[in-house]
Amino acid sequence: MTPAPAREAERILSAAAARTGLPETMLAQGMLADSRGLPAPARAERALRQAVQASRTVDTPPATSAPRLLPHEADVERALGRFFDARLRLAAAPADETARRAFEDCMFTLCVLMAEPCAYAAVREAVQYTEG
C-alpha cells in the first residue's frame, strides 16, 4: 500500500490496530488476504487505509529559514534506480531477507539524500527533484 521499510510498516499496522481496537494479527491477516485478491474485513481495510494516509503526511513542516544543501542530481538518480530495482526484487520474493535489507538500505539512502524523515516523502521528493 505504501513504500516503507519494515519498521515503518509495523508502526502503520500498530496505529491502525490502536485506532480500531482490533488486534494487529487480524489486520495483518486482512492485509495478507487483500494481497491474495480476497476481500479484507471492511473495518480492517478502512483502518489500514487511514493509517497509511497518516504515514504519508509529514508531521513536521519544512524548515524554510535555514538553507539546505542539495544532493547531486546524478546521485539521486542512482539512488532512485537502486530503490526501484530493490522494490521489484522484494515484490518478487517478499520472504527474501536479503531483498528486504536491500530495499530498506535504499529507503534509508533516499531519506538521507533528500533530508526527509518519512520514506514516502523522500521518494516523492527524489522523483520531483530529478524530474524538475
Image (spheres, rainbow, N blue to C red):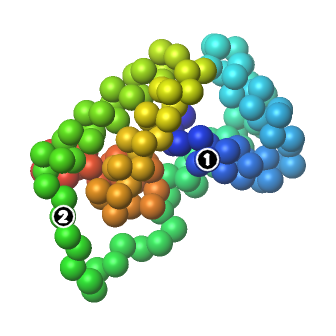
Looking at the image, residue 122 sits to the left or right of residue 19; the answer is left
Mark number for residue 19? none
Task: Identify which amino acid the numbered label 2 is placed on.
Answer: Leu
Q: Does the rendering let one see residue 31?
A: yes
Q: Residues within 10 Å of mark 2 (few under 14, many from 20)?
A: few
Picture residue at 55% right of the left edge, 53% below the top: 55
Earlier along the polypeptide chain: callout 1 or callout 2?
Answer: 1
Looking at the image, which is closer to me, 25 or 44?
A: 25
Q: Secondary structure at mark 2?
A: loop
Picture coordinates of residue 52, whole percent (x, y): 58, 46
Picture residue at 64% right of the left edge, 14% below the top: 36
Picture coordinates of residue 16, whole percent (x, y): 73, 47
Looking at the image, which is closer to me, 50 or 30?
A: 30
Picture residue at 51% right of the left edge, 42% below the top: 4
Looking at the image, which is closer to me, 109 or 65?
A: 109
- Screen quadrant of the N terminus: top right
Picture coordinates of residue 66, whole percent (x, y): 26, 83
Q: Which residue is mark 1?
A: 7
Task: Identify which amino acid the numbered label 1 is placed on.
Answer: Arg
| Above or below: residue 128 compared with residue 36 | below
Give the total of numbered labels: 2
Looking at the image, residue 41 sits to the left or right of residue 112; the answer is right
Q: Residues within 10 Å of mark 1 (few under 14, many from 20)?
A: few
Q: Which residue is mark 2?
A: 70
Measured Cα–Cα span from mark 1 to mark 2: 27 Å
